[in-house]
Every structure is written in structure tokens, then in C-alpha cells.
Image (cartoon, helix red, strand yellow):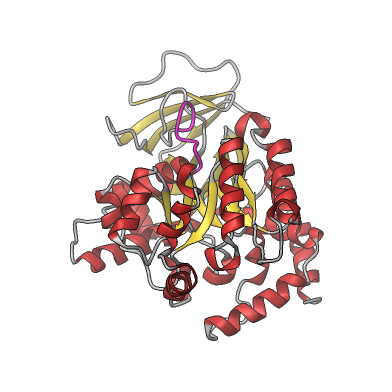
Amino acid sequence: MNQNHFFYHATIITLDEKCPVLFDAYLIIEQGTISYVGTDYPQSLPASCHSTDASDLLLCPGLVNAHTHTPMTVLRGFKDDVPMEKWLEYVWAAESALTDQNYYYSSLLGIAEMLAYGTTSISDMYRSSHTILQAAIDSGIKANICESITNTSDQTPKDLLSVQKSLDLIHTYNGFDNGRIKCDTSIQSIFQTTPELWEFIADMALKENISIHMHLCETQSEVEYTLKNYGDTPILCLEKHGVFNSHVVAAHGIYVTPDEIDILAQNKSSVVHDPCSNLKCCCGFANLKPFMQKGINIALGTDGVCSNNSGDLFETMKFTALNQKMLNNDTCFADAYQVLTMAVKGGLKSQKRNKNKEAGMIACGQDADIIAVDLTHPGMIPITSPMSNLVYAAHGNHVVFTMVRGNMLYYKGEFPTIDLEKVRYEVNRLLSEI
């Protein structure tokens, strides 16, 4: 249930271009919505509200993990440091042993980690999506959920169980809780699907007015496979089958040509940058500058914890900034403001949440999706530049609280909506079985 809040003497990163940072500021939250933010003491306060001296806190809009596989948290550290092909064999075998109950508790564990690290909204693409969705509903986090859809040449798309799950999710839960939960569809990857499925999903997305979330141009072998089998690079191939007639959320986008970048730009696609996972798996990493020069929306993601080992978007922000500067030999590129914008506004735009009350700012009328970082931590002193500290110095464990629509979902190690002891028990029990 929403509680009214009054924060005073806070340092606030608003991400409002008119005034991106406020010092010694005041913030009021009423019924899950920001009703006041400014440096002048408010003329009135809600009749009943929780007051907090925020002089030791840095408040910021919540981060958005725009590409993840939440239940894979259970496979953290599983068969690390082996060749990727061998690693996938181990992972696929482990996944086949998981039950819906396993997926549910693994999802709650992943959500708890992300909440503790300041994430307020996630985009998940994985199997057993209905259990991931239930975990998102129960925890209070915002989420875009889609079933991971694959097929082989002898499978008719409409008869696929994953397609049926996807449609059931969309028709039952898309827009649940006033839009807190949204449902999209997916193409797992180009080499795990067929042109018949691409066209089916393209038609489904258009009919349902939803996005298509997919892995795209992640490895050189993916490009070689597509050229060999279809005579085109992945994005050119998918465009011919109508996939880009809907909003596409393309995770990775490492191996792309200028012509493909033009297609992404023309169709207002979003690209999700996942540097930590890509580097760990030796996939490479995308140069974001060509995308940004074409006005393509960039979001950030952790990918699955199985391939990253962490759900910490602060880590992802720093990796993004450092890699992009080195890649472009430009210390001015991917500055703290740009990267934080990717992690917040870029993520919301990739989720089609960037309008009305979800613009990714601390401003009047916006949903109170807010995180607080501890300014008394030695790693956050001094606070010469709040934006710089947040991107280059902060870690997820500096987060004091995470709220979504004004509801405290994480506060100083506690999770009001998640029974972490139960989750820990279930996950540890699962590990003894796989």
C-alpha cells in the first residue's frame, strides 16, 4: 500500500534537463506519485506522511534492466571459465531440470538482487514466463515479460507451446495493475527460429500492439550462419520478413553494418547494451556511437546472472562508460549523464513506458520510482559531482532503498514483499538437485 513520504535536505538527480541536479532539496510523494520537488520548503505537507532527513542520501530515478533472464540467478557461477559452446551445454542441461516452482523462486531471488541494487523495472525474456510474471506481480517491481520463443523447421508457429504461453500472457496480463506489468513477445534468436516464425511473430506483434524482444547480432557466428543460410545479414534478413514493422528491442547489437543501423533507426528500434555479459562470454561489445549518431534509443541490461554473475546495473553503467571511451578514443564520449540516461530513460523507452507518468525523472506528476544511495559510504565521499559519483563510484550495495510507485520494496537489507529466507531455502534445495 502506498505511503506518503516527505524527504528533506536531499541531493537529487532529477534527470530533468531543465535542472538535472538539486542540492538541499525537498521531495513529496503522495499515493505513489511525486507531488513536489524543489529547493524551496513546500507550502504544505500531506496530512499523513513519513518524514525522512535525507541529508545523507542521493535520490535518483530507478534504474531499468532492459534485458535479463531473471531466473538464471540460480545458476550464478555455474560452470564458469569454460569455452562458450561447452558452457551452453552445461547450462541447457541444468535448465531442463528446472520446474515451474524452481523458476518462481529463482525469479524472486533475481528480483530481490535487482531491487537491492536500485532496479525498479525489468525486461525479461525466458522460458516459464508465467512464473516470472507471478514473481514480478508478487514483488511489486515493474516488468515487461515475454516468453522465449524458438522453433525448428518442422514446427508450425501457431502450434508451439511457447507461442500459446505468449498469447495467454498477453491476453491475460498485459497492462496488469495499471500498467505495472506489460507483456511483449519474442524471437529468441535468428539461429533458433525460422522465417515462418519470424513472420508469425511479426504479425502477432502488430495485431497486439506490443514489442518484439530478441537477441540480435550478438556473435560473429550468428552473422555467418545467417549469411550462409539466408544470404543476408541478420537485420536485413528479418526486415524482409516484416519483423521491424513493430518496435524491436534488440539485445546486444554488436555485429551490425551501417545499412542495418539505418534500418534500426528508421523503425525506431531500441538497442540494449550488455557489456559485462558480452565481455565475459568473449562475444565482443558494441560501439554505441554509430547508434547514437542515428538517434537510436540505447538502453542497458545485465543479461542473465548466469553469464554476468551480477544483477548490478551500476557495474553495467561503469563498464559502458569506460569501454565506450576507450573504443572511440574519446574521454568526452559516454559521459556520466549520457550513461545514466541510458540506464533510466533509455530503458523506459525500450519498454514503451516513456510517456505520461513514466518519463524517468524526479518531477511532479511522475511515478515515484526512486532509489537512494548512501552518501556517508567512504566510496561516495566527497560528493563533488553527484552524477559522476553515481556512474563511476557507486555500486549496487550503496543503495539504501528502492521504491516503485512510492512503495518501499527494499530498505536497508529488508524486502517487505519478498520472504528472502524462504527464497534462500528453496534455491539452496534446488541446487542439490541439479
Left or right: 320 in relation to 45: left
Image position of 165 with respect to 287: above or below: above
- Which residue is painted at 41% across and 34% down in the image? 361
Q: Examine the rendering and report whether any part of residue 358 can be seen.
A: yes
Q: How many marks?
A: 0
- Residue 278 or 76: which is nearer the viewer? 278
Q: Can residue 310 be seen in this view?
A: no
Q: Is residue 181 left or right of residue 221?
A: right
- The residue range painted magenta reads 351-358
Viewer-closest of 155 and 220:
155
Q: Which quadrant does the C terminus fall into?
A: bottom right
The reply to whether the magenta stretch includes residue 354 is yes
For image coordinates 57% across by 64% down, the residue present is 304
Where residue 374 sits: x, y (%)?
Answer: 45, 50
Q: Is residue 154 above or below residue 55?
A: below
In which quadrant will I find the N terminus?
A: top right
Q: Is residue 156 left or right of residue 230?
A: right
Residue 419 is situated, as x and y percent measured from the top left of the image, at: 75, 52
**Would you say 287 lies left or right of 371 here?**
left
Residue pictured at 74% horizontal, 63% vertical:
424
Residue 362 in the image: above or below residue 262: above
Residue 311: image location, x then y, percent = 54, 60
x, y percent for residue 417:
71, 44
Q: Which of 219 and 426 is in front in this view?
A: 219
As drawn, 56 above or below 333: above
Does the segment drawn in magenta span residue 218?
Answer: no
Magenta stretch: dominant SS? loop
